[in-house]
Amino acid sequence: MLFSEHSFINKDNNIGSIEVICGSMFSGKTEELIRRMKRAQFAKLKTEIFKPSIDIRYDSEAVVSHDSNSIPSTPVSHSSAILLLSAETKVVGIDEAQFFDNDLPNTCIKLANKGIRVIVAGLDMDFKGQPFGPMPALMAIAEHVTKVHAVCMQCGAPANYSFRITAHNETVLIGEKDNYEPRCRSCFYTK
């Protein structure tokens, strides 16, 4: 249950926050996460970046955008590991949040309640156009939600759906342009 056993202001009176960056594949979510994390580093804040250990598309450890921008990260298999690995941190970044377990929102709440700025990026919908993993709960508890859009590969309109172009039917299929293309609502449902 969200908010159970949590205080809302830590002992040092620091108030943290949760920011969510969401959208379809190829919309710039990771690029925006990297930008925000690098700004925090520029400000000399202690940062930690995490990604799910199953995501090894570009690099087994770094978070890498489709535009090849990257930032070092720690791969973890469960959200509880983020709490253990973020001591003394002021800003925590989490990429590909949709692949984490459903306890990720509670992990983010605990971090924010310790005075940490938490920046989470992930797909808000799966390839069927349904809410994906812990993302709906994260969006509900976040102070700030940024929805970014790709360009529809069929008509050029703003796209917020990840259309799977292969015959695979499992919900989690980690892939790239060989498996997905961004589409607008009209092209997602009609083509």
Image (cartoon, helix red, strand yellow):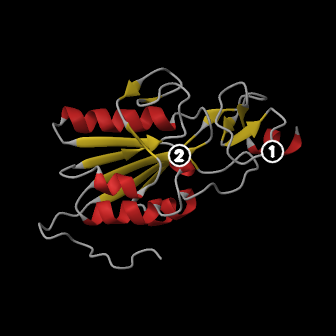
What percent of the width, then of the height, locates residue 69? 42, 23
Quadrant for residue 46, please give it: top left
Quadrant for residue 110, please give it: bottom left
Report the amino acid beneath label 1. Answer: Asn
Of tags 1 and 2, the one toward the viewer is 1
Asked whether the residues under the numbered discs 1 and 2 touch, taking CB atoms below 8 Å apart as contact, a structural biologist would say no
Residue lying at 46% horizontally and 29% vertically, measured from the top left: 60
Q: Residue furthest top?
A: 68
Residue lying at 36% horizontally and 44% vertically, measured from the top left: 93
Helix, strand or loop at disc 2? strand
What percent of the width, then of the height, locates residue 132? 63, 54
Q: Dot 2, how many residues are within 10 Å of its Cα: few (below 14), some (14-19), or many (20+)?
A: many
Q: First in sequence: mark 1 or mark 2?
A: 2
- Say which residue label 1 marks: 169
C-alpha gap between disc 1 and disc 2 = 20 Å
Q: Is 59 drawn above or below residue 150 in the view shown?
A: above
Residue lying at 52% horizontally and 33% vertically, measured from the top left: 28
In the drawing, does residue 45 fall left or right of residue 4? left
- Say which residue label 2 marks: 122
Helix, strand or loop at disc 1? loop
Q: Residue furthest left?
A: 12
